[in-house]
Amino acid sequence: MVTRIGALALADFRERRRRPGYLVVLLGTLALGLLAAPVGDSRWEVFQVTDLHGRYTSGYVGTVTALGGAVWLSLAGFGIARGGIGRDELSGVGRLLAATPLSRAGYLAGKFVSNLLLFGSMLLALAGTALAVQLIKGDSGQVDAVRLLLPYVLITLPLLAAVAGCAVLFDTVPWLRGGLGAAVWSAVWLVMVLGAQAGGGPDVLGMRRISASIRESLAAAGRPVSGVEFSVGLTADDRVLGTFDWPGLGPGEAGGPAATGVLLVGAAVGIALVGALWFRRFDGDPARRGIQPGRRGIRLARPGGASAPTGATGPGGPGKAGGPDGGAAVSPPGPAGFALDRARTAAPRQGRIGFEAMLGELRILVRGQRLWWAGAALLAVTAAAVAPNGPNHAVLPLAVLWPLPLWARMGHRADGGSTDQLLAACPSPLRRGLAGLLAGVVPALAVLAVPALRLAAAGQSRAALGAVAGALLVPALALLCGSLSRGPRLFQTVYPMLWYGMVNHVSGLDFLGASGGRAPAPAAIAGLGAALAAAALALEAIRRAVR
């Protein structure tokens, strides 16, 4: 059993590391490591200690990069960790595995271990970056491998194990596999990270032990510790910061984080395997594959012009149609083909590729999302009742998350069968692409229109225009990501990063203008959205030309 689980996990990891989403998250992880512990002068910080920053000892560099990796990979990494079960189902690999002696629990355990390998490979790269930063910075030439790696082992790896288990659990619940699952996890992640820093929730980031250790070092150096506050998150600070010496967490201080880590790993294993209670592997069930037995709309054409519905029962028994005289009709010899039942099909007509095409694309986006419009209406009512706070509106961060399940469907037909091949015969791929883009803009305007109007009424015209520009940028980004990857995962990985930067008022990533004058101009955001849309349409045109 262990050998089978290991082989499954290793094969799955090798397949997923070749995907674009893995490269995007890996590069983002390395970039975050350089932001957490910059080699030169930088205004960006990931770990804040009031108006101080530590000397680059092994313990300090390891801690700040491990905390940054925990926050980053628990959000962005979730997008590439989940989806393995769905891929096995679509590719047919799942049915091959279902024919083996591998149990349901064993299969889920293999996916869980594969997620751990995925996160572990990124943590190794991040730890290597931390070591390189320490050596290049030169604050401390003494490398302490234990204090450098201990935060990764005690804090980051157990938290990512819980993320890996949740990714497997989400894959076993069909309605959490898509964009809705990404939105749900974003909310869970926000509560988890904020709760860990507030002190009231589980200390999944080890902040209590870290802050206590830093306060002890400050007190030993004769510095005041009252008023010293700690936080984790990507922020910009233009102040001149003082320095302090902190050796990092040692083995003697590992008791609290180690206990929390053991609990997280145990919970992660339980979360990953609990899906075996309802997960059916890939057993054949026509209804679950969208095939409805007994439905008749395709008729079996017989040579000579006679036809009968498939599965029809006549006097001659099942599969034989009754003849004109009430007796059994004898099928003439020869191969049978399929022909459409004209009585059950609509009359052909020449349609316009414009508003009707946009409505069709919109119906595809909202298909299966029965409660989406109810949530959009609730957001609109809430936005109308809440007054803006300067250029910010409290509803905006949640409003731009709500359409995530719809935007993740843009640019591809992951569940549409051969729809792409059928639509490729349309005379104008440009108009069809524009119709898909406009279909993604409609949900954005549905959730952002009321906050934008409230901002405009409060005199925040720049912020209102920024919200409208954001409503154009995000669907264009979704269209490009879907066209590049031919699936939803790349957008579901990239967009949470963009959203995280916007929520933290990172000026370069503030696509809604929430940071006021420091945010990019609305015209620049709209221009970037137009460029992304043009790139997506050009990519589809190139694919059509070389097909």
Image: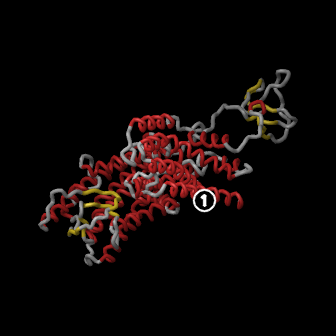
Judge left or right: residue 198 versus residue 371: left
Q: Name the residue furthest top.
A: 326
Judge left or right: residue 103 versus residue 304: left
Q: Position of residue 167 (x, y in %)?
A: 43, 50
| Front residue (pair 456, 351) | 456
| Front residue (pair 111, 252) | 252
Give the residue pinned by disc 1: 535
Which residue sits at x=44%, y=38%?
Answer: 379
Q: Name the residue furthest right.
A: 304
Q: Amino acid at mark 1?
A: Ala
For residue 111, say whether it is visible: no
Asked where in the image residue 68 lies, by quadrant, the reply is bottom left
Q: Position of residue 401 (x, y in %)?
A: 45, 46
Asked where in the image residue 310 lies, by quadrant, the reply is top right
Q: Position of residue 508 (x, y in %)?
A: 43, 60
Q: Position of residue 333 (x, y in %)?
A: 85, 38
Q: Quadrant of the C terminus?
A: bottom right
Which residue sits at x=33%, y=59%?
Answer: 156
